Image (cartoon, rainbow, N blue to C red):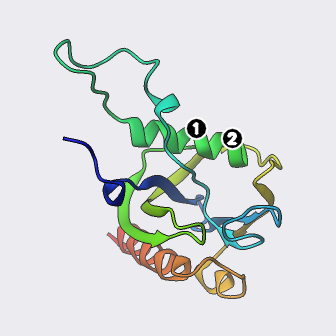
Amino acid sequence: MAVSPRELHRVVPTVLIYNEEGKFLLIKRSPDLKIFPSKWHGPGGGLSMDDYEHLPSASAVQRQWYNVVENALRREVREEAGFEIGTPEYMSDVVFIRPDGVPVVVLRYFAPLAGGEFVISEEAVEHAWVTFEEAKGYDLIDGIINEIEMVDKILKKRKNK
């Protein structure tokens, strides 16, 4: 049975990275990008078969791979921002349709900073470490401020335990 084109979606893992001070990494997207140019967000990017096809399969019966989304997320963070992250935790998902008609599933995570230094890339032209309150002053992709608030509450709750 063939897969209907209405069932195919672009899968995009993204992450809100936080540091020891409880600040969040925001990255400004290049003005040259088709989707959300010059908007601020957390790093991430699209999953592709290149993220797993070359890896050994976890099954001798059928080709399947584990932790592909996390590995793609870590790769995107390195490529887009130059940082390494700790263990990502699932936060939420969102679906939207790009202006070119491609449906997208965004898997949102949050993770602690584990090292590295920011590098300007083709996609990320600037970065800032901000508190939840400071993030309100940035031109964010819709919904990101709600996610920052959600993670800020989680981290403060953990700190108070």
Q: Amino acid at mark 2?
A: Glu
| Residue 31 horizontal side relative to residue 49, left or right | right
- Per the model, the C-alpha gap separating discs 1 and 2 is 6 Å
Is label 2 in a helix, a strand or a loop? helix
Residue occupying the point 52% across, 29% down:
50
Residue behind mark 1: 75
Percent position of residue 19, x then y: 60, 58
Percent position of residue 81, x then y: 71, 49
Residue occupying the point 52% across, 67% down:
101
| Residue 82 horizontal side relative to residue 2, left or right | right
Q: Nearer the viewer, residue 4 or 82?
A: 4
Give the vertical position of 124 relative to 49 (above or below).
below
Q: Nearer the viewer, residue 74 or 113?
A: 74
Q: Amino acid at mark 1?
A: Arg
> Which quadrant of the view contains residue 66?
top left
Residue occupying the point 26% across, 20% down:
58
Q: Nearer the viewer, residue 59 or 78?
A: 59
Is label 1 in a helix, a strand or a loop? helix
- Name the quarter where the C terminus is drawn: bottom left
In the picture, the disc for residue 79 is 2
| Residue 24 horizontal side relative to residue 69, left or right | right
Give the vertical position of 26 relative to 80 (above or below).
below
Cβ atoms under marks 1 and 2 closer than 8 Å: yes
In the picture, the disc for residue 41 is none
| Residue 89 horizontal side relative to residue 15, left or right | left
- Name the quarter where the N terminus is drawn: top left
Percent position of residue 30, x then y: 80, 62
Percent position of residue 20, x then y: 58, 58
Residue occupying the point 45% across, 64% down:
103
Give the vertical position of 95 relative to 70 (above or below).
below
